[in-house]
Amino acid sequence: MINLFDTIKLLQDFVSDSMQRRLEPCRVCRSAIALFLSNSGVRGLSGTNLRAYLLEKQVSDGGWSDPEETAWAVAALYQFSGENHEAVYKAINWLENVRHPEGGWGRHPRDQVRIPTTALVMALVPAVATDVDREWVKQAWEKDLNSSVRLSYKAGFYLLTVNNERGGSIHPLVSRTIAYLAEDQNDDGGFGPWRDHPIGSDPWSTGVVLWGLSKWIDYVDPVIIEKALAWLEKTQLPSGYWAYHYLDEGTSYALIGAVSALRALKKL
């Protein structure tokens, strides 16, 4: 069983400590959202001090440092201030202004449009997502899926952008994506950038894939989910973290993926 208790405690401490140290809002808010999605509070964190911290870091144009950080910050503000907070309006306006003409967002306003960034913005700030953005992600992922180089985490992000209408028909590209991920899963149960990638499975890719697959649980072989959860359980460090470039980043995505999957399987 994944040790959610220690992971939650670690991220609670990380969020509180990071705010005191004035670390990047992306790291603070990503961990906070992982805690919110796991239905866990953040010890020592109130809506007032998180809001004050984020407002201090918000740039005068309405965004934070880039589209991804802005999306995480807006998602955190949603939790404490609701959609009617002025800072949220300003941030959404900024995201709309830096959206590429063809739809979607890059790592920064001058960057090319990217599936991971666009999907994160759409998943975390649904109010800003449009059919143009969805169509761009669909076409970009379909092109990747038909190419020789396909990345599992892009598949997971794509699944987050498609509306799952219960009782409706599933889009053929969603079906192909789920089938691709079943084939791309490593023998150890985890996911890396692609099957048998030199770095092997990692918590970030595995978390993203679980997050995306969980949205389509009715169409996914539960064995795929169970194997990925087993990999997370096996590779979790005694501290509760998962090893990644930034411990908080890999652990936040692993927690989001694990909680989404456990909830989808009705085990949480």
Image (tube, rainbow, N blue to C red):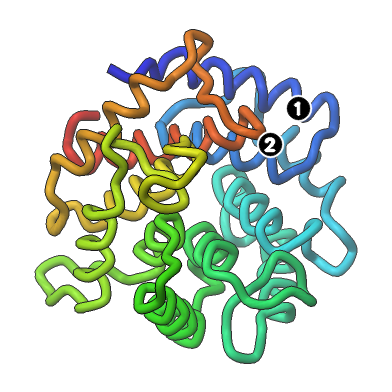
Q: Distance of mark 1 from mark 2, alpha carbons?
A: 6 Å
The single residue placed furthest to the right in the displayed view is: 60
Look at 52% across and 69% down and name the residue there.
Answer: 115
Left-right relation of 149 to 223 = right
Look at 13% across and 58% down and name the residue there.
Answer: 219
Pick whichever, 89 or 115, lies toward us.
Answer: 115
Q: Decide: few, some or many residues near mark 1? Use Cα within 10 Å; few <14, some 14-19, many ≥20.
A: some
Q: Please state the horizontal and vertical placement of residue 118, each as a whole percent of the image.
A: 56, 69
Q: Please state the horizontal and vertical placement of residue 141, each as a whole percent of the image.
A: 42, 75
Left-right relation of 33 to 255 = right
Figure quadrant of the N terminus: top left
Name the residue beneath numbered marker 1: 18
Look at 56% across and 73% down and name the residue there.
Answer: 128
Q: Do the residues labelled 1 and 2 touch (CB within 8 Å)?
A: yes
Name the residue beneath numbered marker 2: 28
Figure check: 216 above or below 176:
above
